[in-house]
Image (cartoon, grey):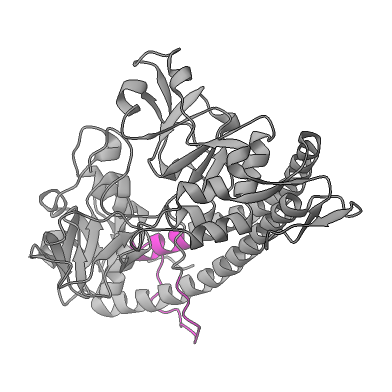
Amino acid sequence: MKKYSNVMNTNVTWIPQIPAHWKLQKINALFTERKKKVSDKDYKPLSVTKKGILPQLEHAAKSNDSDNRKLVKKGDFVINSRSDRKGSCGVSRLDGSVSLINIVLTPSNELNSEYIHYLLRNYRFSEEYYRNGRGIVADLWTTRYSEMRTILFPVPPRAEQDQIVRFLDWKVSEINKLIGIRRKEIQELEELKAEIINSAILQGIDSNVVMKKTDVYYLPKIPATWKVIKIKRICKVGASISNQLKKHTDQDKVVFLPMENISENGKIDCSIKQPIAKVRTGFSSFAKNDVIVAKITPCFENGKGACLDELESDIGYGTTELFNLRAGNDVLPKYLYYITMTKIFRSLGEGQMTGSAGQKRVPADFIRNFVIGLPSIAIQYKIIDYICLKTSQINRLICTKHKQLEFLKELCSTIISDVVTGKIDVRNIPVPAYEHVDDLTADDGEDNDEETGIPGEED
């Protein structure tokens, strides 16, 4: 793509060079901070996410002070001030309210709000914004308006801003189409993987085996040698770690699992370690080889859980929104995990949830009384091996698709950054008719504005 022929140096870290006819202005010269406080009863709550400003997600953590929020009007730019929410910002297309942790800015008339949306959401500005903040540790850095107001940013002539927006809307839509195709392919592969688990756990893997009927409507037939049994007969739901604790001191560090460190495909991130004294009260507990199941919506429906055979400590703690299941002598831990990953377990559990919207939970009695067909230990080993073989093949394909997806996201980010910071001249590029495609899939960590759920961090 063509570059600008006449540029000037700026001595500004995040935009060292801009086209000579662009202006370099401070944020406070072009924005006014909106400080008015309102209630979410009068102005609908909004979520400030990496996808922009959206109606508040149903499962987002809610503030206890619903009458103490900031007003947002359509066209305002909103950014989360905390560094652990880096990239959560955007121009709002809605009137509403946000938590006080956010900064709300009203742009002047000389700015195209969509140009601002592209410019201030690019990663270069994000780094500059948080570089101007302060805090004790890097992941709890906070940037206030008084610290961001003097940040310099590039301002093209208004007509050029409009052309930049037209060009980027087109290019981003084209990339979003490809992103949508890759996501659909990943979803289809995930569904195939789920069907393999479902079929193997409910009916076995031997198509020639003699089957018998059952009185359980979702288990019309199971292999004749299997027994119909409730989960509570083969494992302990909510098992204690009191015996394991006797071998530890309060200063011993063990794995801590916030919900974001538990995946939907059985993987856990053991990178957070905490002293037992800090987490032994107020959190759930579990032991190595236990099976954990998320109890709260939408984590339960999405399949968050794991067999803790790779837990990096003999015991651990985590979010309160977990059940732990400890396998007895008749079931292998990995097999127990696959039972909890069947579609019928998740769909029936969803139907049994209680509580208010956004805070619904699966009752422990649902898990205890869930009925399954159980084979012998020897057959369980064979089924586990079969599932691991088949799903590992699919996982390799999914991994390839995810790499393609990340490339497309990085390409999109690079194009936006290069255009809004004046590295690429798009003034004379004709924009053809195209289908506008947004990328609103929530794949960035289930953003919320209020809390992290990790001990030691601020609420």
Please name the residue shown 40% across and 58% down the image.
Answer: 354
Looking at the rendering, which quadrant does residue 282 occupy? Answer: top left
In front: 117, or 378? 378
Residue 267: give x, y in percent of width and height.
56, 41
From the viewer's perspective, is residue 431 above or below residue 253? Answer: below
In front: 238, or 162? 238
Residue extending furthest front?
Answer: 215
In front: 56, or 149? 56
Residue 233: give x, y in percent of width and height.
62, 39
Please name the residue shown 43% across and 55% down the image.
Answer: 444
Which quadrant is home to the C terminus?
top left
Decide if residue 47 is on the left or right side of residue 336: left
Which range of residues does the magenta coloring cover? 411-438
Residue 204: give x, y in percent of width and height.
79, 50
Residue 214 visible in the picture: yes
Confirm whether the magenta stretch covers residue 248: no
Confirm whether the magenta stretch covers residue 416: yes
Decide if residue 422 is on the left or right side of residue 315: left
Residue 244: give x, y in percent of width and height.
48, 18
Residue extending furthest left?
Answer: 36
**Which is the main secondary structure of the residues drawn in magenta?**
loop
Residue extending furthest right?
Answer: 208
Looking at the rendering, which quadrant does residue 43 occupy? Answer: bottom left
In front: 374, or 114? 374
Decide if residue 298 is on the left or right side of residue 88: right
